Image: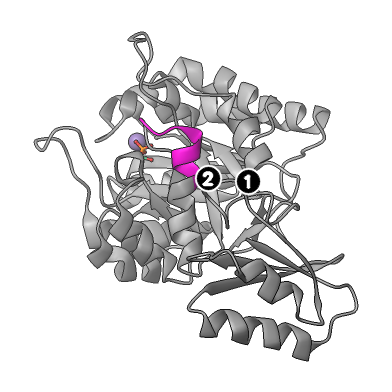
Amino acid sequence: MMVVMKKEHSQEDLRAVLDHLQERGLSAHTSIGVERTVIGVIGHIYPELSDELRAFPGVDGTVPISKPYKLASRELRPHDTVVKVGNVEIGGGSTVIIAGQCSVDTPEQMLETARAVKAAGGHLLRGGAFKPRSSPHAFRGLVDEGLRILADAGAAVGLPTVSEVMDPRDVEIVAEHVDLLQIGTRNAQNYYLLDEVGNCDKPVLLKRGMACSVEEWLLCAEYVLARGNQQVILCERGIRTFETGTRFTLDVSAIPLAKRLSHLPVIADPSHGTGRWYLVEPMSLASVAAGADGLMVEIHPDPDRALSDGAQSLTFANFAHLMDGVRALSEAVRRPLARVQ
Ligand code: PEP
Ligand code: MN
C-alpha cells in the first residue's frame, strides 16, 4: 500500500505515521519527491489499516499497489531512479557504456582493455573475477587476485568498475574492490545472495534470469530494495528460447516494458544476449533505440585467446566502431552518451 502525505504535512505528521506503521510491524519506505511525499508500506496489509492511516492529520490518502513487486514499481515512484556509480549517473536520460573483458585474464591485458574503454569514451570497466561457468572444467576466474587487477586497471585510467559476485560470503570482498556489484543470470533468483547485496551500500547490477519473466525479474529487484539498498540497475541479457543460431535471445521488448513497469534504470547486454561478436553492434543499436539507459559489452585485446567468452568479445577496433554508432544514435534519440561529472 502507498500512503500519500498532504502537500503541507509537517515532520511530526510524517513521524506519527511512521511510528504507527512500526508499531504494527510493517516496514515503511519513504520517498520524498518534489510534488509529494509517499510511504510504501510493506508487510501484512490488514483490512482496517487504510482507515487507521487516513485518520492521521498529515495523510491525504492511501492507494493500493496492484503489482506484486511494490518498491520496484512505478506506482510507488513515478519518476526515474538515477543510480550513481563512482562519478557516473545511470538512468538520468543519457546512455552509459560499460565495457571490458568477460574475465580478468592477465594484469597486462586488463590494463590494455581499460585504456581501450577509456579511449573510446566508455564509462565503466568490467572484468569477471568469480566466473559462473556452465562447465566446471572451464576457467573459473582469478577470484581475489582478479578483483585487485580489475581495481588497479580501473584506477589507472580513472574508470569505476563492476564485477560479479556469486556467493553471499564474497559480497564483502567484492564490495571492497569494485564500485558496482553484478548479480549474474544464474544467480538472479538466489534469494540469499539478493538479501546480502541488499544489505550493502554499493549499487547492484541485476541481470535478468535467463528463464525469468519480466515480473519475476522485478521481484528479484524487490528483494534487494526490501533490504534497504535502493541503488539497483536492471540488465536485460537474453532469455532461453528454441533458437540455436544465437546463444540466447535478447528480449529487446523487455527494455521498454521494464522501464514502463519500474522506475529503475534498465541497460542491455548484447554480448551474452547473442553470443556472437558480429551481432553485438546491431543489437546495441537496437537496445539504445528501445530506450536502454546503457549497454554492457565484452571486449578483449585478443578475443581468440580470451579465457572466457571470446566468441562474443569485440576487438578494440570493433568496439570503437560500435561506440561511433552508439554516439550518433543516442544523440538522435535524445539520450546522449553520459557526461562524466
Ligand atoms: C558475465 O557478465 O560475464 C556473465 C556471466 O553474464 P550472465 O550472468 O548474463 O551470463
Ligand atoms: Mn561473459
Which quarter is ligand 1 in? Answer: top left
**In the depicted view, which residue is nearer to us: 316 or 97?**
97
Residues under numbered marks 1 and 2 in contact, where contact means CB atoms less than 8 Å apart: yes
Can you give x and y, in whole percent of width and height, for residue 119 in the image? 60, 43
Q: Residue drawn at (73%, 83%), measured in percent from left and top?
A: 14
Q: Residue drawn at (56%, 61%), measured in percent from left and top?
A: 231
Residue range in magenta is 211-218
Q: Is residue 193 above or below residue 241?
A: below
Can you give x and y, in whole percent of width and height, for residue 325 in the image? 68, 24
Q: Residue drawn at (29%, 60%), measured in percent from left and top?
A: 192
- How many labels, in total? 2
Quarter of the rendering occupied by the N terminus: bottom right
State which tag comes first along the sequence, 1 or 2. Answer: 2
Q: Main secondary structure of the magenta part?
A: helix
Residue sticking out furthest to the left: 137
Q: Residue 221: within the magenta?
A: no
Three-letter code for the amino acid on which mark 2 is drawn: Leu
Asked whether mark 2 lies closer than 8 Å to ligand 1, one says no
Local crowd size for mark 2, using a 10 Å CA cut-off: few (<14), some (14–19), many (≥20):
many
Instruction: Tell me where residue 81 sits by quadrant.
Output: bottom right
Q: Which residue is mark 2?
A: 234
Q: Is residue 98 left or right of residue 340?
A: left
